[in-house]
Amino acid sequence: MFQFIFKKLLLVVPTFIGITLLTFTLIRMIPGDPIEIMAGERGVSPERHAQLRSELGLDQPILVQYFDYVQGIFQGDLGVSLITKTPVIEEFLSLFPATVELAFCAAMFAIIIGLPAGIIAAVKRGSVFDHSVMTISLTGYSMPIFWWALLLMLVFSVNLDLTPVSGRMDVTYWIDEVTGFMLIDTLLSGEEGAFKSAVHHLVLPSIVLGTIPMAVIARMTRSSMLEVLGEDYIRTARSKGMVPMRVIVVHALRNALIPVITVIGLQVGILLSGAILTETIFAWPGIGKWLIESIGRRDYPVVQGGILIVATMIIMVNLFVDIMYGVVNPRIRHAH
Amino acid sequence: MELLEVKNLCVEFGSEENPFRAVDQVGYTVSRGEVVGIVGESGSGKSVSSLSIMGLIDYPGRVTADSMLFNGQDLQKLSDKERRKITGADIAMIFQEPMSSLNPCYTVEFQISEALKIHQGGTRKWRRERVIELLEQVGIPDPKSRLSNYPHQLSGGMSQRVMIAMAIACEPILLIADEPTTALDVTIQAQIMDLLLDLQKQKNMGLVLITHDLALVAEAADRVIVMYAGQVVESGPAEELFSTPKHPYTQALLRSLPESSVGQDRLDALPGVVPGAFDRPTGCMLSPRCAYATERCHNEQPHIQGDKIRQVRCFTPLDANGEPVQ
């Protein structure tokens, strides 16, 4: 098992080199540099421009800049934002809990609804329930996220006044930041109503962000379950005279989960990298919004560092999925 | 009392208005300690008829029968719960593909002791001992070391032995073996058959042996049922049926054996295939392929007739010389 993990970790090295090269070059290929963006419409004199460029180290040969950047990574230094002058890692850490919190709730929403829906649809294939699940999930999958978000806001926030429109917290509360996770911090603060407010703020963004993963999980679970339910070993299980529930949960689900776990892993990876649309629409102070804004500002270190961290997380999630694979599927465990 | 008595068993698939009868008015009996062979080509309804006895035919399949008596109890009249108590305990089944019939996610021990747990309960320690004992009974060397094996670590023959251990775990009195050796190497086939017959004698079980291997049936079975296109076309004691077949289909099956074509250039083969869902003939099911078919055979369905011992479904059953009686 340890050897298996070690091998997987070794494979990560070339991926990392690729990511650093790609982000480094791509962000520099976008026209304009941070100084021009900061100067805005007023413009900046060529002398001042050159001076600022040399202050920021942008006048160095491109290879030297890349080398400095990689050297920084090895020393655990992702650089300092050109705009705010705070270290990238610090900015990231202050925003990341918001993204994790939202991603976690969205993933929970997707799994708790998607998995059982897929299972029941497969078991009762051809039924009204099956057709409804398939139709709803197809709709969910193909619906534009921003439109879905606005629709939910219109109905639940504006018309029914059940949920807030944006943000993480009502402004009437002041919560000390302990973990950065609003759900935990509000509980720790002991302030009345704060937790409820945090939950209220999470509901709509979680549903919006979790809709596509839910649809993907439901469809994947259904097709995987259908395949497994037709297998010979399901017939064997039934021939032992066990209750149908046990056949489905113990014998079918475990086998059917193998492809579903991959899908869940990939989806969680995507969620953690920040939901650009959802975070923007709900003014959710997370990674997605931060990265998009930093691209607009040509904040090279933030884009490079941020993407590197996000990529690391996706790699970690995938590694975790690979390990889970081995736990669920003995054929994989023994092959390594 | 017979152990199993099936009368007029029908299994239908497809729409209510235009159903496809995979099994058509099948009836047979099995007594304790008896080996009954069911033979027939692929698609003749052998497996479906035994799956319906196990209660494993799913919607949209429809099972009907005048009676399906097991040990005096009509299986059709039982609730699902009562039926499950019998399935896997008193009636057990072994399947064709041992490699894919074991769940790849669970160990040998888990899968065998599961059957014990469902029907007999007992402590974990007792079940483990029982599993070891069962593995020993089915001839698996060093059974203790096999407990934690997963199916992908077993060979085909070994998997079938595990399947047999699983089936006999709760001491069934009726064992249905659906082509138990078809997927195995020839050398292993004989071993598995010997094991099955040994266990059958030891435990005095009724054994239904479904196969398309005539040689196997001739050796193992006391009585033989020949099925064609979902119907029983002939049944009788094995020796009699093989020496003097009464149904043209049985005769054709026997003639197509390599042994009966010694000295000939080509094997005698029955032309055509078993009729499917859409090309069932109006008269006798075999009429399009039968060498002796008459006008009547093409228009009218023969009924099964004969005494308790020997039955045949033909207007002109064959005599001792293999010629149709006019």
Image (tube, grey):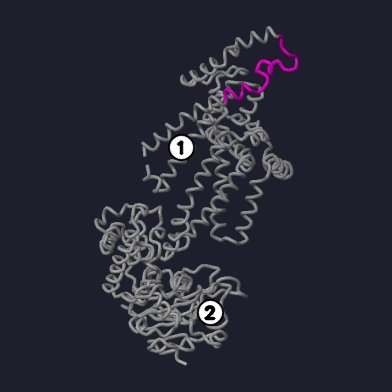
Nearest the camera: A215 or A335?
A335
Name the quarter where the C terminus of chain A is drawn.
Answer: top left
Nearest the camera: B242 or A34?
B242
In the image as oriented, which residue stretches furthest toward the bottom?
Answer: B326
Q: Nearer the viewer, mark 1 or mark 2?
A: 2
Residue B324, image x, y percentages: 45, 88
Identify the amino acid type marked 1. Answer: Leu
Residue A240, image x, y percentages: 40, 65
Residue annotated with mark 2: B288
Is A182 within the magenta? Answer: no
Mark 1 element type:
helix
Mark 2 element type:
loop
For image coordinates 64% across by 56% down, the residue present is: A132
Q: Which residues are magenta?
A: A23-45
> Is A144 situated left or right of B161 in this image?
right
Q: Which mark is residue A319?
A: 1
Residue B82 visible in the displayed image? no
- By secondary structure, the bulk of the magenta-drawn segment is best described as helix
Q: Are marks 1 and 2 in contact (CB under 8 Å)?
A: no
